[in-house]
Image: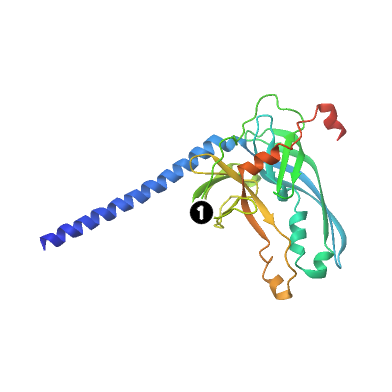
Amino acid sequence: MKRQVVRMGGWLAAGVFVAFSAVAAAGELEDQGRAILEKNQKAVITVQMVIKQKFSAMGMGSQENENKEEATGFVIAPDGLAVLALSSTDPGGLLDNMMSSMGDMGDKFKMESNLSDVKMLLDDGTELPAQVVLRDKDLDLAFVRPTTPPPQPMAFIDLSAAGEAQTLDPAIALNRLGKVANRVCSASIERIQAVVRKPRTFYIPGNDPTHTGLGSPVFTMDGNPLGILVMRSIKGERQGAMAMMGGMGGNMLGIVIPVADIKEAALQAPQTPKPEEAEKK
């Protein structure tokens, strides 16, 4: 009996140790996330724009609308160059791919988008007139710059030390919330569900409901930037009515484009134009 009591005591001690270890690990994860937020939140911005859309579809004729929209992006250089998801500024490409699976209705669908009055809203409330200087449809990336060079270096996320992740690794995503939340910067703990290696590497985050949105920068737990959340879409095969009623046929997916692709695309972004050149555009 004495030997059994000692053995049960050992199992109990082991269980308590595991429980405390789990709590400590969870607390460490949260502490790391808060440190990443504190270090990088000033570089996470709201990009405000007016989007004028013109679209036509079978049986609907042509229609136009104009809306003021906001999207999350983040500054990647001290001169103000920032990156965001192209689909948050121009959803036309996504809708074209979605409609491609809808037969004749999809073939007749056309959409054009034009941007105007682009502004970068900074962490301290400063508004900087800006312009889109580069679009990469393959990566779903758009780059914006202030139309006038900032008087002093801007807070930015340093992409020189890129992180990597494996399946089931935790990650931290930052996002600017809307006006209703005073555009505060939020942080979410995400988990990488899959890593795609070909034809190019990208990460697939989990689909748990969080405040992570398109344009959110994503970090590994050691604080290195992993990439940006964008929308990947492909043209779908034509489907019957039942398949279309079930959704989009799996031809759209939120993914994290790695830092290496952001850096490569950013090399093509033109420099901030001189004031007299900006006025002509």
Using the image, determine if residue 138 lies above or below residue 240.
Answer: above
Residue found at x 71% / y 59%: 234
Residue 153 position by quadrant: top right
Using the image, determine if residue 127 lies above or below residue 170.
Answer: above
Residue 257: where, in percent of width, then height?
63, 48
Q: How many marks?
A: 1
210 vs 87, left or right, is left
Please say whether residue 27 is visible from this viewpoint.
yes
Residue 99: where, in percent of width, then height?
76, 64
| Secondary structure found at label 1 | loop
Please say whether residue 217 is visible from this viewpoint.
no
Q: What's the coloring here? A: rainbow
| Residue type at the position of mark 1 | Thr
Residue 101 position by quadrant: bottom right
The residue singled out by tag 1 in the image is: 167
The N terminus: image quadrant: bottom left
Of 137 and 210, the residue lying toward us: 137
The C terminus: image quadrant: top right
Residue found at x 71% / y 34%: 127
Q: Residue furthest left?
A: 2
Badge 1 crowding class, 10 Å Cα cut-off, few under 14, some 14 to 19, many 20 or more, is some
Using the image, determine if residue 24 lies above or below residue 62.
Answer: above
Residue 188: where, in percent of width, then height?
53, 48
Using the image, determine if residue 76 lies above or below residue 6.
Answer: above
67 vs 222, left or right, is right
Residue 90: where, in percent of width, then height?
76, 50
Residue found at x 49% / y 38%: 35
Of 94 and 237, the residue lying toward us: 237
